[in-house]
Image: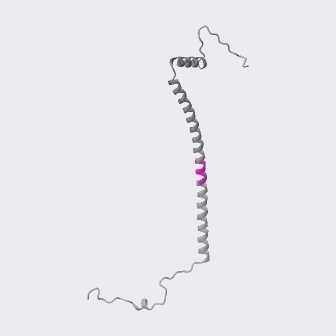
Amino acid sequence: MSEKNRPLDVTPDVIGSDEPETTAKPTSKRTRRLAFVALYVVVFIFAIYAVVTLVGLHSQIQERRTELEELQGEIIVQEIKNDEMSKLYNYTDDEFSDYVEQIARDDLDYVKSGERVFVNVSGD
């Protein structure tokens, strides 16, 4: 006989069986309680992890905001310096020589020949 026409090999205990196919053991109260406790512990640990992570992220955000404010202050200072440099670049020869003279007097304490400078040493 060919395999298509061969009769199935069926045993009588499978056909007329009234027993359920799987025999599941009923879970005890202790097992269920342990499962719930384990679930609560896992959820609690996750909540702690989430809080710690959020606090860490908040501190990083504050640090970055402080850094941003400092950089914005530096940008403002640099823009002022750039404006001064662009004004200096556009000075005429007379304006430039007056500027150099002013820098020499204020920053380098230079004086013109024959000029007297009086310094108040008392601090008043």
Q: Residue at x 59, y 36 (%)?
A: 73
Query: Measured along the vertical axis of the image, is residue 48 above or below residue 95?
Result: below
Q: Residue at x 57, y 38 (%)?
A: 72
Q: Residue at x 60, y 48 (%)?
A: 59
Q: Is residue 120 left or right of residue 112?
A: right
- Percent across and percent down for residue 113 are 59, 9
Q: Is residue 1 left or right of residue 38?
A: left
Quarter-of-image position of residue 37: bottom right
Predominant SS along the magenta part = helix
Is residue 55 rendered magenta in the image? Answer: yes
Quarter-of-image position of residue 11: bottom left
Quarter-of-image position of residue 52: bottom right
Query: Colour scheme of this structure image?
Result: one colour
Q: Residue at x 59, y 57 (%)?
A: 50
- Percent across and percent down for residue 48 are 61, 58
Instruction: Look at the image and tell me in which quarter the N terminus lies.
Output: bottom left
Q: Could you say which is closer to the camera, residue 8 or residue 66?
A: 66
Query: Measured along the vertical axis of the image, is residue 39 above or below residue 85?
Result: below
Q: Which residues are magenta?
A: 54-60
Is residue 6 rendered magenta in the image? Answer: no
- Percent across and percent down for residue 78 are 55, 32
Q: Could you say which is closer to the camera, residue 40 or residue 121?
A: 121
Instruction: Look at the image and tell me in which quarter the C terminus lies.
Output: top right
Query: Measured along the vertical axis of the image, is residue 15 above or below residue 123?
Result: below
